[in-house]
Image (cartoon, helix red, strand yellow):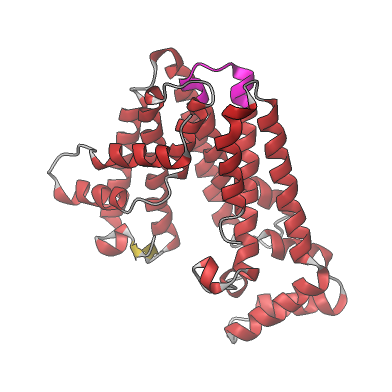
Amino acid sequence: MVTIKDCQEIINKKLAGLSLPEQPVNLYDPIRYVVELEGKRIRPTLVLMGCNLFSDSIEKAVNPAIAIELFHNFTLMHDDIMDQSDLRRNKPTIHKKWNVNIGILSGDAMLIKAYEFLAHSPLAGLPQILEVFNKTALEVCEGQQFDMDYESTASVTLQDYLQMIELKTAILLASSLKIGAISAGSSEKNAAYLADFGRNIGIAFQLQDDLLDVYGILEQFGKQPGNDIASNKKTFLLLTALEMARGEMLNTLKYWIGQKNFNRDEKVRNVISVFDGLGIKEITENKINSFYDLAIKSLEMVSVSKSRKQPLLQFAEMMMNRRK
């Protein structure tokens, strides 16, 4: 069995040897730049772990794992342009370091490279892997579009939000595990249970991010808490509060949401006061735990020994405790 660290080292070594043409410089240097930023490599690690759940030979899953990582970074490059983000992993984003047109074109090239690696997946599972990958790629785009639509839509429900984060965030974790399982030759039933594990962990992960943005400690969270409140971002916490609030609490929420010129600290403090009065923190924690429990139940249904599941159980615990 391989550990999370083993998988990360395999992925980093493979990416370090990524062969790209020298010219045109402005097409390929941004790809090198993004790859060298590294990160936790969560998604490609899950491909390898999904394979290792059923097979000791994980080499067969390395190419699809690299494809997943390149695809993920392609989406981040384009997301940063759409969101006009200045930083990614504390480094300038591609469109800031170069320009928007280069960011778009280099992202496109990265997606093509992803398909090159995907084409070198195990032949027996290649049709199914391509089907999962293509379906996932479209769903990620759907999730991003919903996210952008919700910025200007007043009537967003909790169910709308959960569907959006499933598509935008959780589905890629689910598909990473499923592609790993297919690479190992697992049954369709086992691959589906494993995907459910990833999907539910992914939703819990995003809900925890929502929670930590409001209640996280600056030194642990890595950024100033309250950014989602200050920007009126529709999160699980805010949408739950809007559904539950009545009277003065509802008026307070609507007042601060409607303010264009405001003192940031005052807005954050007042909105958190409403959250506290409604018990939003506890409600969100319970929701996180419910998705975590669903994930563990799905993993339990996979028909392999408990010992082979230990690395994924450790991964789930790491995801849920990463900033507590």
Q: Where is residue 73? Give x, y as percent.
A: 38, 47
Above or below — where is 52 with respect to 170?
Answer: above
Q: Where is residue 302? Give x, y as percent.
A: 65, 24
**283 or 243, nearer to the observer:** 283
Name which quarter of the figure residue 276 lies in.
bottom right
- Picture residue at 65% right of the left edge, 41% below the top: 200
Q: Residue furthest left?
A: 23
**Is residue 233 visible from the viewing direction of this image?**
no
**233 or 91, nearer to the observer:** 91
- Picture residue at 24% right of the left edge, 60% below the top: 98
**250 or 180, nearer to the observer:** 180
Q: Residue furthest right?
A: 247
Q: Is residue 42 left or right of residue 237?
A: left
Magenta highlight on residue 208: no
Q: Where is residue 252? Give x, y as percent.
A: 76, 79
- Picture residue at 64% right of the left edge, 79% below the top: 268
**Is residue 18 visible from the viewing direction of this image?**
yes
- Picture residue at 48% right of the left edge, 29% below the top: 1
- What segment carries the magenta color? 181-192
Name which quarter of the figure residue 196 lies in.
top right
Where is the C terminus found, in terms of image quarters? bottom right
Q: Is residue 313 left or right of residue 40?
A: right
Q: Where is residue 112? Give x, y as percent.
A: 31, 35
- The rendered magenta stretch, by its main secondary structure, is classed as helix
What count of labels does the image hold?
Answer: 0
